Amino acid sequence: MPESIPSDTKDTPTPSENTAKTRQLLGMKGAAPGETSVWKIHLQLMKPITWIPLIWGVVCGAASSGEYTWTLENVLKAATCMLLSGPLLTGYTQTINDYYDREIDAINEPYRPIPSGAISLTRVITQIFVLLISGVALAYVLDLWTGHEFPTVTALAALGTFLAYIYSAPPLKLKQNGWLGNYALGASYIALPWCAGHALFGELNWKIVVLTVVYSLAGLGIAVVNDFKSVEGDRQLGLKSLPVMFGVQTAAWICVIMIDVFQAAIAGYLIYINEKIYAVILLLLVIPQITFQEMYFLRDPLNNDVKYQASAQPFLVLGMLVAGLAIGHAGIH
């Protein structure tokens, strides 16, 4: 006779269940319903997986300042800016986006906290304001800590929260337009944390602002990847995402071209400022990125979007750091 299953293992989650719960907690596609801890639900709304690029942007900004040194104070200052850019302001952005996207999510991702009824709208609104106020207050603390005459970090935080609001909320709701919405998202993920990190340790000037704004055009391509998971809901509700406007395959090509072309443009700029070794490294990082684009994304953008991001995006973020180090080395600060 077959052995009976021990009673203490009957309710043990399977590996697939654990994976689904982890994905849900991180705010990733392919999660599963059923979370009951209200604090985990609050964290899920903040989508921790999306904090990483902004935290990395602070690192790139510190590198481009050319003045970062490994002192305890600088490490603490950088870590505080990462807390500002990641959990607080990105958490605010993701929460307010989920609040205004609850009808779309009911179609595309019904397991999300709001459409599934796992959390009340009152709690969601409270979270939005707590993260907003905490973020702006911490930005002002960083300005005082750094001794800025003009509150640069606070201004960047205010701009970021404003962009997050008009991206998600009517009447503007920038995400209704695939170009404007995705560029606003790209700028928020690249330009704003980079400028904040740079301002903490160096003098933020127009050259750095322009460079990060241009780099954000590559970020537009990354932002488009997120639109493929919600094509059906966007189409039903009249949102003009690029996959809806141009079709899935054409939008996939627009996405990869934007990423690759503007990274190559940054490499060209590095050659212009005589940082040729850094330029070569940046171009070499684009090669495996193109490989994964062809291997995964261009073949099946609807099903391979997450796999593509996991395999190709690390090369983009490493390229950002290479560019930051080059700018710091060249003394453009």
Image (cartoon, rainbow, N blue to C red):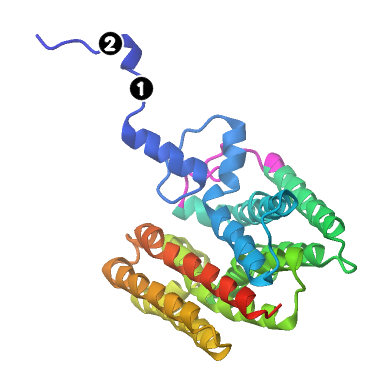
Residue at (45% x, 76% y) in the render: 282
In the displayed orientation, state which residue is furthest to the left.
1
Does the image show residue 240? no
For the point 39% across and 34% down, which residue is it? 18
Snapshot quadrant of residue 78: bottom right
Q: Where is residue 70 in the image (x, y as percent from the top left)?
A: 66, 55
Rounded to the nearest angstrom, the CA distance separating label 2 from label 1 is 11 Å
- Indicate yes or no whether the magenta region holds residue 243: no
| Residue type beneath disc 1 | Thr
Secondary structure character of the magenta stretch overall: loop
> Residue at left 80%, top 56%?
142
Residue found 79% across the figure and 52% down from its top:
138
From what the image shows, is residue 17 above or below residue 126?
Answer: above
Residue 8 figure quarter: top left
- The image position of residue 77, as x and y in percent, is 73, 53
Q: What element carries label 1?
A: loop
Q: Which of 188 and 124 lies nearest the eye of the viewer? A: 188
- Which disc, if any, is residue 12? 1
> Which residues are the magenta region?
109-123
